[in-house]
Every structure is written in structure tokens, then in C-alpha cells.
Amino acid sequence: MIGLMNVETKSREDRLRTVLNNLSLIGITGSTTSTTEAPLILIEGKEKEVREEDIVVIENKNGGLILAVCRKGTGINENLKVGGYSPGIAYVRSTGKAPSTAKEAYHFILSFIGMVEDDSLRANDVIVAPGSPVYVFRGSKNNPLEFMRPDDCVFGGFLAREKNWPIPFDKRFIPYHIGVFGATGSGKSFLARYLLIPLLKRAGYGVLVLDWAGVDYAPYFEEVVSISDVKRDLDSVISYIIEKTRRFGYRQEPNILTEALEEVITESWSQLLDACDGPEELKDRLKELISRKIEGSELLDRYKRTAFIRLERGFQKISPDDLRELMGKKDVKELIVQPGRVLVVDMHGVGDEEKLSFFLTLAEHIISRMHKKEELNLALIIDEGPQYCPFEPRGLQSKVTDKIKDLCAMGRKHKLCVVLISQGIAGEIGINAAVRRNLNTQFIGQIHPLDIEEASKRLSPYGIKPEGLLYLEPGKFYFVGKMNPSPTPLLISFGIKGGE
């Protein structure tokens, strides 16, 4: 018992030095080291064992133990250097065999995680001495992530190189928002279902999922609500009808008809919903009330005639099914789930405008609660992010993009976590740059070639080759940003057994 207490009271650095005795020496640091990275020269034969993304510890001769990740593996043989004549090249050409391996070497670039101190992991500020020994972590008993875990964390998933090493996620930064990026087939929805949602529940958040197509989440969870069942607020109803009628043919908004529409919706929408038996009657009554507004206005007769023609033409663009989606009875406040619960909104079966109109209603309700200084403890997972906030939003998407920015800006202080899931990071296949800047934790999986440049900006400073993301295995993601206790990205994965 006393021995166990002594182990528990040891500092992190002391525990790491104890673990060091069980680790395998794989090489030493080479020349041209710095405070953020160092070359690793492998001992002969270790090139068959050490892989990219392996976690190592450097016993710095200048003092301290530094955790690092192996990146940019390279093999060099001076006898086989191409681009000019050499005896080695001549030997290959004449015999078809490899020359001597005397001038052959293998090395990695070590991207530093940080220096392990008494009770914390901090950024390294000491130059690593060339010739410092480097040891690799192996096996479930020697988990390097134990030495970087924050005080307030929740575990989930595991390092891609070792399933027995769960990842510590820093709970403090959950409301700093999350982005999940990956091409079709990269495993984005699996990451959300089997890693993020269970993780957020354990962290004390309720989870509300907006399932755009109704196929990635709705079939897998017990609590599901159809988008058609949700009551809309007046602003989203007005925006939706204006979008459907294409502003009644006018170039600008507001105009004669949109002003009349706004007055009718504001004054009579609730009564219309109660009085009308179905969407066809609702459509007729709505058009009738707008006509009365125009008739009673002080417009010249010729302007009234034009307005009536455009009203008729505009309402021809609206079908009864379009209005049926606005007749839901469930109050939007019922969607704000308590911590530990998961609710999925099934959004299939309606058009894009209906979905965006619903989102405006939901966002406005959440924002109003934050204005009242409520602590929400809510994670809002938005599937198919570019449908809401594309890189160049237009129409309803412009309003939705602004609302998402507002949710992100206010959410940090009210425990609201916005999770955006997207096939692309930037540009035509990605999400709006102003929104993306608010996503302070990102999971980047296999990407589309169009995203090479954007991925390079995010990952290249840490020694990760962006072209490697083109053939990253499904289910593997680079974990980047605030929730990651490691300043350098980690390649992670997750299990799918026993998920939601």
C-alpha cells in the first residue's frame, strides 16, 4: 500500500524516467536541432520497426525529457544518389544489384509535443543537444499520453498506432467549437457517432444532431424528431416564403409585397395555423390577406395592378407541401436536450429552403437563451456544413452563415459547442472562412485533392505531408487544435463496437 502511494505521488517527470528503463533505444538526435524539432538518426535495423506517427521521448543532454512524434521518414544512400554519375550508379547499371550499404542511413524529423515537468507538459524552450538518445513507446503499459493529459479531461478513441492508448480531450475547450473534415468515405459520420457524441455526453453535454439527409444519424439513435413537426418562428417563415417566391419578382427587398407579407405573418400567423385545416387552405387565406393589405394601401392603381399580378405569380411557385413544412406544432425549445441525452432532427423529405428556415428558427431560439445568460451545456452537430455556410453564401444561406457565426461567438461563454461536419475544408467544396476560423478543434481525415493547399496550411508546420492525406485510411483523422493536449497534431482513430 505504501509503495502504491509513493507511485501515485511521484511527479510526471519521475514517472517518465522510471518508464524510460522499459523503453527501446532507437537512435540519437542528429545535427541542426531546435526547440521545436530535431532530426532522428536510427540505429541500424530500427528502420524496420519505427514508423511515422510513433511517439518517442528524447533524453535531452541539455536537460529535460521531451515527448515527440516521428514525421517525414527518409532513407539515404550516398552510393545511390541520382542526378549524376557515381561508382554506385555504375555498379547498379552493370550488375543490377545494390551497392554497399556503408553509406546508407535512415532518419525521421521529430515534431516536439513538449517537455514533461513535475505536474505538467509545457512547450519546450531548450535547444536539444545533437547526440541525445531517443526511445520509442511500445505496449499498453507504457502510454505516453498519460504524461500529457490535462487536469480536466475526458478520454475517447485511441492513437492510430496503438489501440490501448486512449486520447485525453481537454474539456475546457469543448465550447471553442469543432470541425470535422474528410472526403466521402473517410468516416466522418462514424467519427461523430462513435467518438464525438459519446465523448460529449461524458463531458456533460446534451447533443442535438441535424441530420441533413436523414440517413447518417436518424437510423442509429432512439430519440428522433422530424423537421416537419417543429414550429417555426415568424422571421424564418417570412424569409422562407420570400425565398420561395423569389421576392415576388422584384429585384430588391423590401418591396411592396414583402412588406405586406411581413405585416400579415406578424399579425395573423398563429391564428392562421389554428384556423386552417391544411396547407391548401393556409395558402389561400395567406394570399387573401396579402391582397387586402395591397388593396387598402395608398399605392397608385397601376402599381396595385402590378402587385396583384406578381402576387399571383409568386404564389404559383409555392406548393401546399411547401407550406405543410411550416405548420409544425412542436416548440423549438423542446429540442434543447439536457446533458447526457442525444436527439436527432431528421431533415429528409423537405427542400433546402425548408431546412435552412428551420435552422434559423433553432438558432434564434438558442441565441435568445444565451442573451438571458443561460448555460446551455449543449453540443449542436451540423451535418453537411457547406449546405448551411458555403464559401460564398447567397439567399437564406447568407442569413444562416451569420447565425452560425453568432452561435460560435456567443457559445464560448455559455457552454455551447458547435460541431460542423464537411466534405471539404475551404473553397467550393468547403465552408465559409469566417465560420471556419471559429472551429478551434479540427479532425482532418482523407481529403479531396482540391483541399491540398488548405490542409498544408494547417498541418505542414508540424512535419505532416498534406499529400499523405489523399490516401489516409478511412477512420483515421489528424486531431488538431485546442482540445488536443499535444501542440502537434496526433493521428487518431476509434472503435465502432458498442457505439450508440
Image (tube, helix red, strand yellow):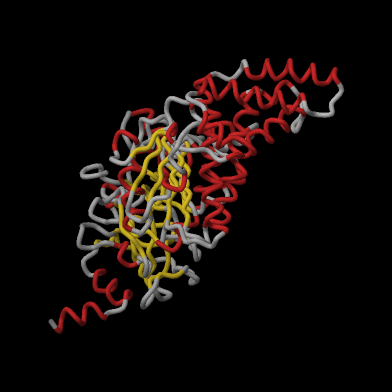
- Up the image or down, 101 lies above or below 358; here it is below
Label count reads 0
Q: Quadrant of residue 255?
A: top right
Q: Position of residue 94 (x, y in %)?
A: 36, 28
Q: Position of residue 327 (x, y in %)?
A: 49, 31
Residue at position x 65%, y 32% from top? 395
Q: Is residue 105 visible?
A: no
Position of the N terminus, as image quadrant, is bottom left
Residue at position x 36%, y 37% from top? 187
Q: Position of residue 97 (x, y in %)?
A: 31, 32
- Between 401 and 317, the residue placed more toward the observer is 317
Q: Position of residue 203 (x, y in %)?
A: 35, 59
Position of the C terminus, as image quadrant, is top left
- Up the image or down, 56 lies above or below 209; here it is below
For the view shown, which residue lies furthest in the bottom direction?
A: 2
- Between 109 and 390, the residue placed more toward the observer is 390
- Between 309 and 124, the residue placed more toward the observer is 309
Q: Is residue 180 visible?
A: yes
User: Is 485 on the left or on the right of 300, as rendered?
Assistant: left
User: Is 474 on the left or on the right of 314, as rendered?
Assistant: left
For the view shown, which residue lies furthest in the left direction?
A: 1
- Up the image or down, 242 lies above or below 53; here it is above
User: Is 264 on the left or on the right of 307, as rendered?
Assistant: left
